[in-house]
Amino acid sequence: MLRYLIPLGIFITLVIFLAIGLGRDPHEIPSPLINRAAPTFRLAELKEPAKTFSSDDMRGKVWILNVWASWCVSCREEHPLLIDYAKSGAVPIYGLNWKDKRDDALAWLEDLGDPYVLSVADLDGRVAIDYGVYGAPETYVIDQSGTIRFKQIGAVTEDVWSKKILPLVQELNRQGNSK
Amino acid sequence: MTRLRFLSLLLICLIVSLAVAKDAQPLGEDPAVEQRLTNLAQELRCLVCQNETLADSRAPLAEDLRGEIREQIKAGKSDKEIIAFLTQRYGDFILYRPRVTYTTYLLWFGPFVLLLGGLYVLFHYIKQRRELISEKPLSPDERRHAEELLASVSGKGPA
């Protein structure tokens, strides 16, 4: 009896492990930057390259940094949602235009609408490397102290927004106001 | 027997072969820097393709990261510093050779535990078999009986 039960037991364990493994998205690599200070950057603004924007300008505010590019297909998918969320005024959304051509990026915003308070141009992708970006879109929630509190890899969905990002932003704002 | 077969099959599955790929060196750069870059990039995973090393990948991000590593090498950073720079941003996932930490003990030592388990089962099995077929000298009665049987078959008397 035992000689049949042992292989069966091993087999079932293997199946359980494989089932869990298959259910995971291998493209979601956990970021080591969660709960770490967001890397500071100063970059030229996309629309007005003469002006620069620094992540330090956002100290004391909860904000969202969204990595996007005109060549990125999933960005197009999440774009209408971002516009809705920007209109709701829940949290300011800033764009990091990643390795894009300026004309393409501007045309993209012209066509599809601009949800961003402003976008900065990361032409050579150096800031994106600091943020551990490996595929657009990626979205970071950064708190008042400049700490990354959440990272969404891939397009923001309604589910992610209403269940994760929005409650987190509200909680951070509540904590910030009580201080 | 089935258990033994199963375990040996499991062991065969665990033997992983190593493949080493070399790519062409870009010309016109400092060869020492390029050599270090290639060595380093072969230890690092391309995050976009995931099953390719940074050295082999043609993804734009891999090119950016190679550029970043090249600059850091030229700036005199050690391999350790460069790997720390990358893992701070991309996590341990970027390392092709996982670090030995408590979360990877099973990964590193699991195969050896299985190997030891297999060896234990194997020795146990062989020992059991040896006991089963161990030779027992015949008692005088048995010997006489055997000789009678032989004699009755061949028709001749005992030698």
Image (tube, coloured by chain):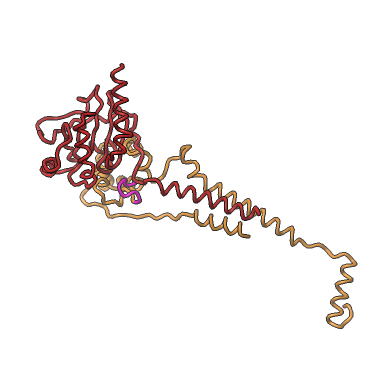
Chain colours: A red, B orange
Question: Which residue is painted at 23% across and 36% down in the image?
Answer: A66
Q: Quadrant of residue A120?
A: top left
Q: Which residues are magenta?
A: B45-51
The residue sitting at the top extreme is: A179
Provide residue A67's location: percent of width, then percent of height: 23, 38
Is B58 rendered above or below residue A87? below
Query: Residue A175 lies in magenta, yes or no?
Result: no
Provide residue B67's location: percent of width, then percent of height: 24, 43
Q: Foreground: B80 or A11?
A: A11
Is B54 rendered above or below residue A133? below
Q: Quadrant of residue A79?
A: top left
Q: Quadrant of the N terminus of chain A?
A: bottom right
Question: Which residue is painted at 88% across and 71% down in the image?
Answer: B145
Observer able to see residue B73: no
Q: Foreground: B22 or A63?
A: A63
Is A169 rendered above or below residue B11? above
Observer able to see residue A168: yes
